[in-house]
Every structure is written in structure tokens, then in C-alpha cells.
Amino acid sequence: MLLTLQQLEIPPGDRLILTALKWQDYEQILGELGEHRSLRLSYSQGTLEIMTPLFIHENTKILIGDLVKILLDELDLDYEAAGSTTFKSQTMDRGVEPDESFYIDNCTKIRGKQRINLDIDPPPDLAIEIDITNRTLFNNYEALRVPELWRYNGERLEINIIQNGRYVTTDTSYIFPQFYLIHKIPETLKIAKQIGSAKALKQFRKWVEQIIT
């Protein structure tokens, strides 16, 4: 008897790894699982990782996404939030689903589109991964040429920027160079656990306003 993906249960925080797949298998799995799902998929040259996020994972990604939106709004930067869109390229044989992602410099190039295909469309300008249960690998994001990748492990924010096709870890965001985010974002996330997300976001906005005025 053959099992279907709907019959598989992946406990929150765990992951399932499938190997020796072809691109067509990956596409079929994406189609079978559908777009409205809690599972996150990462595909790289025949290996597919399927993960079910924990509450802390989802809560953290939403908060960091909200912090990025505050930065973009206060700086009056045009953008499109892309969330956990499936970014894939058959040419590169890779596909990723960030926890959060944003088009900023390239937002007008994808605005109004229903689907993104990295064989013809630009990658997001910023991708964010929450590494509380698993460590995100660089390979897919480097191959897909995502300019800036943030990784947060529950304590520390790591900022990586593409230079000569490879990621370099830096203290400063290319998109938000005037802000010391590797300290402020973890600090704000810790404050949110004590006083709540709404109050922490208001404090962060005031901090941004003080710096840019």
C-alpha cells in the first residue's frame, strides 16, 4: 500500500527529509500539499526537507516581520511583503520558503503577480529564517541570489549579505544601514515576552523615530 503525504504526521518542531527526488517530484509534492498549509518546504538538488513549525517559531517570525514593516514605513520605503512564498528555480534545481520575505528594491517588478518564478523573476531583497529548532543552510539562498538573509536562533540575529556570490556575515544590514539591528531586534523580542507584542512594537517604533529625526 502506498502512503500519501496527507497520511504523514510531522509533530511540531520535527522535520521529514526525502531524498533522491526529481524536480517533477518536488513540483508534484507542492501541488499535493497545496498553498494553504502550515508545513514549510526546502528543496535542494534532489533532497526535500518538510518541517512543521512550533508556536514560538511562528510567533517570532511574525514579530520580526512586524519590526521590518515598522522600519520600512518609518523610512517611507516602498515594498511588498512576500511572507513564506515558495521561491523556486528549475534551472538551479532549488526551492525555498522563507519564514518572512520582502521585496523592496524590486517591489515594482513583482507587484500584481500571482506567482513568482525565479527563472524569470528577481528573488526577494530580504529573507528571514527562524532557526529555533533547525539551522538554515546558506546553499539555497546563495544559489537563488537572495541579497540579504537574516537568521534568528532565539537569542541572536545574524545578518548575511551576498558578496561575489557568497554570503558574508555582517553587523549592519545593507537595507537598513543606519540601525544596529543585531542588538535591537533580539532585545525587542525579549521585551515582547515580558510586556506583550503590542507594547514592544510601539517602543521599537519610537526608537526608530528617534534615530531618523
Image (cartoon, grey):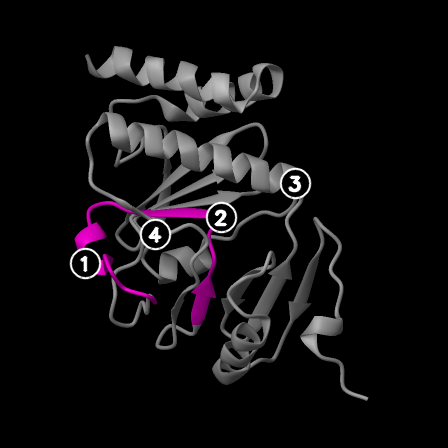
Where residue 16 appears, as percent x and y from the top left, is 69, 64
Within 10 Å of the Cα at label 1, are there few (<14), some (14-19), or many (20+) other Cα atoms?
few
Residue 166's disc is 4
Q: Determine whether the residue tagged by mark 3 lies in a helix, strand or loop.
A: helix
Is residue 76 toward the left or the right of residue 129 in the image?
Answer: left
| Callout 4 amino acid | Arg
| Callout 3 amino acid | Phe
Q: Which residue is mark 3?
A: 55
| Callout 2 amino acid | Asp
Farthest bottom residue in view:
1
Residue 99's disc is 2
Q: Nearer the viewer, residue 121 or 150?
A: 121
Q: Determine whether the residue tagged by mark 4 lies in a helix, strand or loop.
A: strand
Residue 59 occupies which quadrant of the picture?
top right
Measure the C-alpha gap from mark 2 to mark 4: 21 Å
Name which residue lies at 27% across and 33% down.
72
